[in-house]
Amino acid sequence: MKKFSIVLISFVLIAFAAIAVQYDSLDVIGNGSLVSFEKILKILPKTPFKQNGDWIIESPGNKTKFVLAKSENQVNENAGGQYALYLEFDIAPFLKAGLNPDKLPENIIAAKNAIVIGREFKIKKLETMFTEPGDTLAYLYQKILNSNRSAIGYHSALDHYGIDLGNGNMFEWAKDSKTNDKDIVFVLNPQPFIDAGVNPEKIDGWLYAKVPIMDAKGKKTEVFKILKPFNLD
Amino acid sequence: MVKQTLSIGGMTCAACAGRIEKVVRKLSGIKQANVNLASEKLFVEFDGAVLSIAAIKSAVVKIGYSASDIAKDGAQDADKAKKQKEIAILKTKLIISAVFAAPLLYIAMVPMVNWLKDLPFPTFLLPMSYPLVYALTEFLLTIPVIAAGYKFYTIGFKALIGRSPNMDSLIAVGTTSAVIYSVYNTIQIALGNFTAVEFLYFETAGVIITLILLGKFLESKSKGRTSEAIKKLMGLAPKTAIVMRDGKELEMLISQVMTGDIILVRPGEKIPVDGIVLDGNTAIDESMLTGESMPVDKKAGDSVVGGSLNTTGAIHFKAVKVGADTVLSQIIKLVEEAQGSKAPIAQMADIVSGYFVPIVCLIALGAGALWFISGAALPFSLKIFISILVIACPCALGLATPTAIMVATGKGAENGILIKSGEALETAHKIKTIVFDKTGTITQGKPAVSDIVVTNGIEERYLLKIAASGEKQSEHPLGQAIVNKADNQELFPISDFQSITGRGIKFCADGKTVLAGNKKLMDESGISLTVIGQDSDRLADEGKTPMFISIDGKIAGIIAVADLIKNSSAAAIKALHNLGIETVMITGDNKKTAAVIAKQAGIDKVLAEVLPNDKSNEIKKLQSGAKITAMVGDGINDAPALAQADIGIAIGSGTDIAMESADIVLMRGDLTDVSTAIELSKQTIRNIKQNLCWAFGYNVIGIPIAAGLLYIFGGPLLNPIFAAAAMSLSSVSVLTNALRLKKFKPKAEVL
């Protein structure tokens, strides 16, 4: 029994060691997200472009953007520069739905024409990445993946990958754009907007819906979100 | 016919026991085969000319169990060591299983359970970020648990293939389904279907195995306690004895002691074998054998029993019975046979157990399929299937009766009550009438002086002394009673002793001529009895035998002799009346004497002047009213009646034949033990009924809940893990309930 126990425990330890060694290759969500991210970039109506050193992904209609900023010191026209990753979208529908910009929390920036929601993202490292050779958006994504893996997630209800922008805000894209009718989705936490006077059901061009989600631990729950999905096919 | 007991390994539930019995009973030449799940023993009785023990063992091994002989020498040590090894292995398996199942359960439950969500969780394992790593980690943690419980699979699937599924089959099928489905989902995750992480049931399999191992571990510990009484008995005999050989004291193993050896036992040492004291005086504590708490004085000529404790003086005794012939060995054999026997109440559990597992398999398949067909998702249906398999508990059914019988027979033995079979233990609680033999059972069986009447100026002490002086030469039992009464007195030397057959004796003592005998002797000798005529009649009316003493031709007095009732008889009869039992005394004595004794003891009914051969007929008559009748006796002449009665109860101080014919033997010859035996029987049957009720009830309630009955009406769905916990609990609770019988105390002691 003693020998059996030793062999058994040794086997399990070796197997765990093998998992640790192969950890990156076993990261199916991280690796899968990169593949699908590259695919999404290819089907976007407007090719992602660089502006003032930032990478910008524009949705159809150009009124919604997902920005990977080069530097937190980078100041763009909507003053979203303090974030490394952020969503930028038209403020008009929100104003129309009752938004009082003064009541928005500090982390949501209301500029003249746009609202910016984002997160700081180990910015110095990101800045370095921008200057590395082979500076492509996919390459940059991989770097983000490697350095901030926890920011990348999988949303099983929509079969989406996503980048967590903090406070319940996400930029999501379809794992398989061929089978999914929501290829990219801007996901907002409605509460700060509701607190700032917005009637979430009356935001033009946005959906207010209950979405089943799982937190990172896998705990299932349903929450309301403000969504802006795009079908790119 | 050959009777033998084999030790059986690998049994887990009543279905296993049933399967072994079925296979062995099919062998040609077998008369009886009983498996005791609790003691893990197979008792076989077979025709040695037709069948061999090797063939029986082979048949048992062929169906997946081990069968081995029980060591005769050092049986206690070998059995103890074997059991301890088994428990140690089980403990190691449980530890391995728990060590891996705990983190498995943690990483599976923390993400799922609301009130656990704030507990720390390693980010590199977050199921929605690293589903494959998470799944593989769960899988790896499950492997050692499965390995620790591999016997469930080897035995379970083997039994399933042999179309005799047992409890292991249920566990094996349930957990294998969970693991296979989880492995499938792990592959799905690797293929990109990350939602499959929601359908991992590795922890279900792991925790089920761990809980079952925990249950088995607790069960094995409890099982050990059920046979503690027999271990105590086995431990009574010392390992060595000091034998006198060629004038030297040699310490040798008890197995080397031979009949006729002279053995020295010092104070504080145990008597190694049965024998007769040659020299020395001592007091022997026989409480472990008879339940009698007072040490018994022993002198030359008295018998000593192996296993009893020499308390005060050193003695030499001659070995009369050694090895398997000793009283202790016989008691152990008897208790072991009783513990291995089946009570009729066990038959129902046996029948149910035989069909139980296949039916549960069908219910599990049916319920899972029904849910699936009615639109439930596959994982839900699988959960139902697994829950039903693991909540069903045939082991509790199998343990319900034998554990209670083991504890009760052991408890009986501790109190000097040897119950020879489970059937006797069960029947005893139904007794409505008890018939007592008179002599040696209700009475002491030895005549004793009860009254002394003196006349013509003779002193009582003198009368006894002179009578005893003459009776010492007589061999008559009545005379012996007088001698015993005068035990402490210095007697007169006598001369001219003459025994007059059928009358008495005549002798000279203290210079006087003395006659001692019956009325006929006095009449024929012309001695007037007028002065003591009234006393004589009164004593006769009381059932006593008056012995007249005349000195020098004048009546000097009467010494009455009677077979007195035992001190405990009246209290014992009263205790039986309190239990609602009718008491009857049966005797060959005349009605007058019988009535007197019956009155003193408080007996309800007397059957007097019954010839020995007719005793069994009288029992038959009493039984004709469908009344369960017991007979208590001690003599050879009681044997037919003991055998005829529904329960024969022999007094241990009686003859071997009486004990052989009886179902229950009272080692210390105290009649209060009759009511104790009945009380023990009543408590045991109550305990068995509680056990069966729990075991049946548990399955009757548990299986529908596991099938989702509550869920249909908006209630909760049973998690397979809780099903496994409940299943383990059921066996442990049955055992714990049976062990309550260890607290049984005879009412006489309690009072």
Image (cartoon, coloured by chain):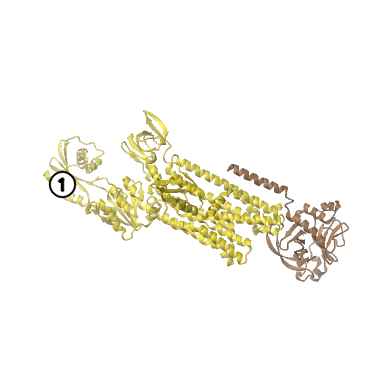
Chain colours: A brown, B yellow
- Please indicate, yes or no, whether residue A60 appears anywhere in the rendered image: yes
Q: Nearer the viewer, residue B259 or A131?
A: B259
**Toward the viewer: A157 or B480?**
A157
Q: Residue at x 72, y 47 (%)?
A: A21
Image location (x, y in percent) of residue A11: 65, 45
Q: Nearer the viewer, residue B292 or B174?
A: B174
Q: Residue at x 68, y 61 (%)?
A: A220
Total of numbered circles in the picture?
Answer: 1
Specify whether B550 is left or right of B313: left
Q: Give above or below for B437 relative to A170.
A: above
Q: Position of residue B314 (x, y in %)?
A: 36, 34
Is residue B110 in view? no
Q: Position of residue A18 (x, y in %)?
A: 70, 47
Q: Residue furthest right?
A: A52
Residue found at the far left of this picture: B526
Quarter of image, res A7: top right
Q: Residues within 10 Å of mark 1 (few under 14, many from 20)?
A: some
Chain of the residue under label 1: B
Image side of residue B698 versus residue A18, left or right = left
Q: Amino acid at mark 1?
A: Lys
In the displayed structure image, the side of residue B256 where residue A190 appears, left or right: right
Which residue is tagged 1? B519
Instruction: Report x, y in % for residue B49.
Output: 39, 45
Near-viewer residue (B408 or A189) = B408
A105 left or right of B150?
right
Secondary structure beneath disc 1? helix
